[in-house]
Amino acid sequence: MPELPEVEALKDFLTEHLVGHEIVRVLPVAINVLKTYDPPLSALEGHRVAAVHRYGKFLDLATDGGPHLVTHLARAGWLHWKDRLPDGPPRPGKGPLALRVALETGEGFDLTEAGTQKRLAVYVVQDPQQVPGVARLGPDPLADDFDEQRLAALLAPERRRLKGALRDQSLIAGVGNAYSDEILHAAKMSPFKLASSLTAEETTRLHTALRTTLTEAVERSRGVAAGRLKAEKKSGLRVHGRTGEPCPVCGDTIREVSFSDSSLQYCPTCQTGGRPLADRRLSRLLK
C-alpha cells in the first residue's frame, strides 16, 4: 500500500507534470471506484490543474475554478504516468485499469488496481474536506507543529498496542503497515507495547523515529519516477516484508506475526528483549 512517503513523492511528481495543464478528458473504466456523483467527472474537463496536495494517503488535484479530484490508492492501487496516452477510449473489462485522465498535451495518467479486493477510491468534490476519509484524518506527522508534546497527547488515552495506534489514520495521518514496522524498529519498541504506557524518554524516542523514518523515506523517493516508487519503497525497508532475513542492526532473524489480512515484522533483539511475540495464527495451525 502506498503510504505517506510514496504519496508525497507522487504529489511532487504530479505537481511538476500536471500544474498549469488542462484536463481535457476523464474516462472511468471501473465505475465502482467513483464514490461521488455530483459534481460529475466531466466537471473536471476544461479546467487547468492549479495545485496538487497530499492529505495523509490521499492525493488531491485542485483545478482552477473547478472541482477537486481526490484519490486514495488503497492497498493495490497505483498511478501510471503516460507521456503519450493510447489513442481511443479504454475498453472496460477485467483488467486493472480503473480511470484515465488526459491532458491537452496528449499526456496523462492511468489509475490502476490489481487483485480482487477493489478499494481504490476516486472523489470529485468542491472541497477535499467533503471526503469522509480526509475529514477524519489526524495530524500529519511531518507537519512543523507535530512535536513530542503533541505525540504524547495523542497516545496518552490510547489503551491499545502501538502498532495499531500508529496505523490509525484518525490519530496520525499517513502511516500504514510497512512504515509502522519501520518506525517501531528504529525506536526499538515492541509493536505490542501499550500506547498509553510510554515514558517521556520513550515518547521522545518514538517521535524521533517517526519523523526520521518518514523524512528519510520521502528523501529517497523524491525525484523518482512514479513507476519506480514501489521498488524504491521496498529497497529502503529494514524489517517490513523481510521475515527470515538478518536484522541490519543486530543480525538477529526478523520474525513475523500474522493476522487475518496482514502481518507485521520485527526484530526480537532490537525490540522485544530477545523474546519472540506470540503468533496466534501459527499457534492454531500447530494444535
Image (cartoon, rainbow, N blue to C red):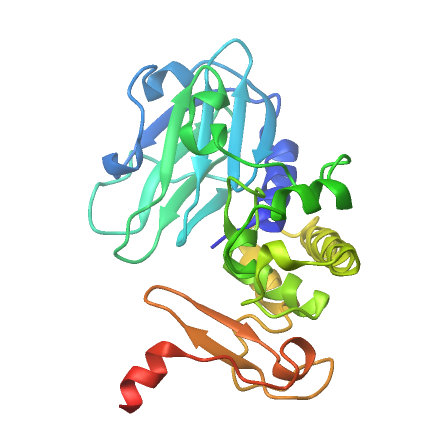
Residue 223 in the image: state x and y as whole percent. 70, 48
Vertical placement of residue 155 versus 87, above or below:
below
Query: In terms of image quadrants, where is residue 217?
Result: bottom right
Q: How many marks?
A: 0
- In depth, the one of 66 and 140 nearer the eye is 140
Q: Which of 86 and 225 is in front in this view?
A: 225
Rendering coords of residue 120 (x, y %)? 36, 43
In the picture, the quarter occupied by the C terminus is: bottom left
Vertical arrangement, residue 284 with respect to residue 20, above or below = below
Q: Is residue 179 left or right of residue 100?
A: right
Quadrant in the picture for residue 145: top right
Can residue 147 be spotted in the picture? no
Q: Which residue is drawn at 77% across and 36% down?
A: 144
Query: Is 89 on the left or on the right of 230, as rendered?
Result: left
Residue 97 horizontal side relative to residue 243, left or right: left
Q: Taking 93 as reference, is 240 left or right?
A: right
Residue 91, percent across and down? 23, 41
Give whichever of 190, 174 is nearer the camera. 190
Give the answer, above or below, for where 209 lies relative to 253: above
Which residue is found at the position 64% from the left and 65% from the top?
184
The answer to whether one can see residue 89 in this image is yes
Q: Position of residue 106 (x, y in %)?
A: 48, 31
- Given residues 222 and 212, the one toward you in this image is 212
Q: Which residue is drawn at 56% across and 34% down?
A: 55
Q: Which residue lies furthest to the top in this view?
A: 65
Residue projecting furthest to the left: 93
* Residue at x 31%, y 15% (from the top left corner): 38
